[in-house]
Image: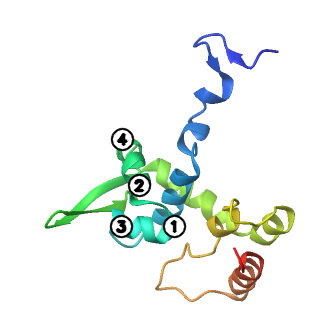
Amino acid sequence: MSGMDSSTNLPYSDRSPFVRLLETPGRVRILDVFLRKHYTELSASDVANLGNIDKSTFTRNKDVLLELEIIVPSDKEGQQQYYRLNTDSEIVNVLGRAHSELTKFATEVNDKTTIDKADYIGRLIVNDVNGPSSEPNEEEIAVEKAITENVQGV
């Protein structure tokens, strides 16, 4: 079996919308920031700081996210453009559910992966999907504690 798709002459995985959406660590970090901060508007600088990425990484990836209507422009203050998660998007709703479900496996993922400076999985799973208005339950507190212990020193 060839790894090429005969209809497009592209490697099979290159046609996958899943692979294309999550293609780069920077884009995954951007998605994570918007999913975790779904209740607020963010500037490119905010996303860069929260995602531990360069502002240019956001700039390079925002057009894809805008085109897919995952994020939408919101207010503009002077030269500063703000963006928000498009909670009306079915893609966003699916990603949000997946993000939330994945947090249930945070301890298992962290136990079975190596956490070092090159590995960002531990940071991506930090439980913050409920927003600031909800109090974490005991399970969420335990998950966050396990993650924090596993990523210390990163």
Q: Which label was assigned to residue 67?
A: 4
Viewer-proximal residue, 138 or 128?
A: 128
Indicate the position of residue 145 as horizontal and vertical percent values. Answer: 73, 85
Residue under numbered circle 1? 52
Residue 138 image label: none
In the rendered structure, which disc, 1 or 3, sits on the residue that comes first in sequence? 3
Of callouts 3 and 4, which one flags the residue occurring earlier in the amino acid sequence?
3
- Amino acid under label 4? Glu
Q: Against 9, is 115 above or below?
A: below
Are dots 1 and 3 in contact, CB under 8 Å? no
Q: Quadrant of residue 99?
A: bottom right
Question: Which quadrant would the N terminus be assigned to in this image?
Answer: top right
Q: Please tell me which of labels 3 and 2 falls first in the chain.
A: 3
Q: How far across and down, in percent of the image, does residue 130 sit?
A: 54, 76
Q: Residues within 10 Å of mark 4 (few under 14, many from 20)?
A: few
Nearer the N terminus, badge 4 or badge 1?
1
Kind of residue at badge 3: Ser
- Secondary element type, mark 3: helix
Say which mark, if any, is on residue 45.
Answer: 3
Residue at (76% x, 67% y) in the render: 115
Q: Amino acid type of disc 1?
A: Asn
